[in-house]
Image (cartoon, grey):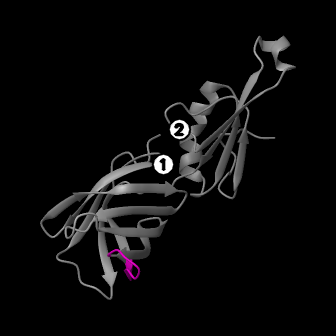
Amino acid sequence: EQDVFKADVRKATVVTLYVLPDMMLSLRPKLLAELTPGTRIVSHDYHFREWTPDNRMTFDVPEKKEMVGFSSTSLYLWIVPASVGGRWRVEYSGVKPAGPVTLDLNQLFQNVNGTALVGERKTELANVKLRGDAFEFSLDSGGRAGDRFLYRGKVAGDTMQGEVHWGTGVAPRRYAWKATRIETPSAPLAQ
């Protein structure tokens, strides 16, 4: 037993909680700062307000009705997201893009949106997914209508790297990509 705010939780891969709402909010900054991306947090009945859960299960517990007046209970699951907010410079192996490539990413917990600047052409990121340290998004190719570049990678601190699929059809071209964060937002992830 120890003070939850002083406990070292950095090695945890799963955290389970059954604490009141104010305590959930008080713990949120510590959990986001100390837990490794991909760590699972499971809570019984209470949630982290605007940090939407990755999954939720609600079911009936009849014996609960006598104590609190209702019988439903909920379990919430969150996957701790990597911090991806900020500006990133992207480099490729085996291909040269039309100009320098930067990503400007906005993040609220696991929800990410942003833009890419390829040379002078700015485009919105689409189909953005962040689950733990796995990051995926697509970009309009700027060529034929409907063509997209699909990026998949892993985030590790201020770098991310993976593979991009260029083009469409049966045999899209594949290239390695790596991004380095060159500017950090003032409030990463949200607290």
Residue 55 tag number: none
Q: Position of residue 76 (x, y in %)?
A: 66, 38
Extreme bottom residue here?
94
Q: Position of residue 138 (x, y in %)?
A: 35, 63
Number of marks in the rendered image: 2
Q: Are marks 1 and 2 in contact (CB under 8 Å)?
A: yes
Quick check: is 171 in the magenta stretch?
yes
Is 139 magenta? The answer is no
Instruction: Say if residue 50 shows up in the picture.
Output: yes
Image coordinates for residue 156, horizontal then vertical, percent: 49, 67
Q: Which residue is mark 2?
A: 52
**Marking on residue 110:** 1
Q: Secondary structure at mark 1?
A: loop
Q: Amino acid at mark 1?
A: Gln
Q: How busy is the neighbourhood of tag 2: few (under 14 within 10 Å), some, or many (20 plus)?
A: some
Q: Is residue 160 above or below residue 171?
A: above
Give the magenta range.
167-177
Residue at image x 28%, y 63%?
146
